[in-house]
Amino acid sequence: MNNEEMLEKIKLDRPNQVIHEVISFKENGYGFYDVKVDMESMFFDTKIKHTKATLPYPFSEYEKLSEKDQFEWRFNNL
């Protein structure tokens, strides 16, 4: 899979978010991908057109993690 294919997949997984580009991705030890993206975001009432973030894909696999593991994943991917 390449970045363009991952971009298509993560856009389908997160239809309410504007994701411009997949910068990189890798499998993690939890059974899903850590995907570094360039995306739109909101900071209070200000729309930020380009910000970098790491998103879990597929999100449904991330949701299956325990609360402790979700916290650990978020902490490691700030």
Image (cartoon, helix red, strand yellow):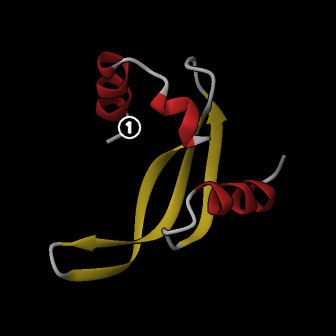
* Residue at the image point whose x is 21% and y is 82% from the top: 46
50 or 42, which is in the foreground?
Answer: 42
Residue 8, picture quadrant: bottom right
Label 1 secondary element: loop
Determine whether, in the image, residue 62 is placed left or right of residue 31: left
Determine whether, in the image, residue 46 is placed left or right of residue 73: left
* Residue at the image point whose x is 42% and y is 55% from the top: 53
Determine whether, in the image, residue 43 is placed left or right of residue 40: left
Residue 75: percent from left, percent from top: 28, 31
Specify the amino acid type for callout 1: Asn
Residue 9: percent from left, percent from top: 72, 55
* Residue at the image point whose x is 51% and y is 73% from the top: 18
Regarding residue 57, the answer to whether it shows in the image is: no
Q: How many marks?
A: 1
Q: Which quarter shows the C terminus?
A: top left
Determine whether, in the image, residue 69 is placed left or right of residue 23: left
Whether 19 is drawn above or below 74: the answer is below
Regarding residue 13, the answer to whether it shows in the image is: yes
Q: Residue furthest right?
A: 1
Whether 78 is drawn above or below 6: the answer is above
Residue 37: percent from left, percent from top: 53, 59
* Residue at the image point whose x is 38% and y is 17% from the top: 66
Residue 12, picture quadrant: bottom right
Name the residue tied to disc 1: 77
7 or 61, which is in the foreground?
Answer: 61
